[in-house]
Amino acid sequence: VTIDEEPCLLLPLHTREKVEKLLFRGGEGDTRGHMQDSDWCNLAGLLGYEEEQIATFQQEEHPVRALLSDWARKDCASIDALCTALRKINREDVAQSLVLSPSGSKPTATSVV
């Protein structure tokens, strides 16, 4: 089952939240621990974002959500592209969580924050 024709990140809410948590595994209790931002910042770079844009995402309460929401609006956004970028930063675990998300039914849109 491919989702290539669908706009990216039409993921079930629980899947999107799981991806966010896996990418933003800052210090426990401190979800704004910027010392642990490297995974999602590297992902942002691979997705074409400049340092200035990444810094803007870092100011958000949920930086990974802000990144993914913004990227999902781009024409090039697809599950395959996201998984490829995740694998390039050695986050096969996150890519697998996308691939293994329930695909028995058509994905539902999540709210864009």
Image: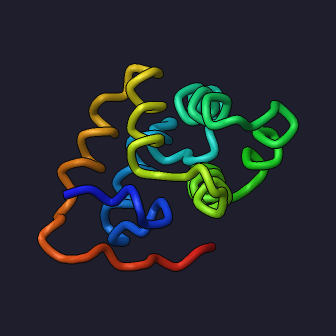
Above or below, 51 relative to 9: above
Residue at left offset 57%, top offset 54%: 68
In the picture, residue 1 is in which quadrant?
bottom left
Report whether 12 appears left or right of 24. Answer: left
- Report the number of numbered marks: 0
Q: Residue furthest right?
A: 52
Is residue 64 or residue 85 the one in the foreground?
Answer: 85
Q: Residue at x 24, y 48 (%)?
A: 99
Q: Is residue 89 left or right of residue 61?
A: left
From the viewer's side, name the closer residue of 13 and 84.
84
Q: In this rendering, is residue 83 above or below 100?
A: above
Residue at position x 65%, y 63% in the image: 73
User: As drawn, which residue projects farthest toward the left?
Assistant: 104
Please provide percent x and percent y for residue 16. Answer: 40, 60
Judge left or right: residue 39 versus residue 44.
Answer: left
Q: Nearer the viewer, residue 12 or 18?
A: 12
The percent position of residue 113, horizontal first and vertical second, equals 63, 73
Horizontal and vertical percent position of residue 17: 40, 60
* Residue 103 picture quarter: bottom left
Q: How is the image coloured?
A: rainbow
The image position of residue 60, as x and y in percent, is 73, 56
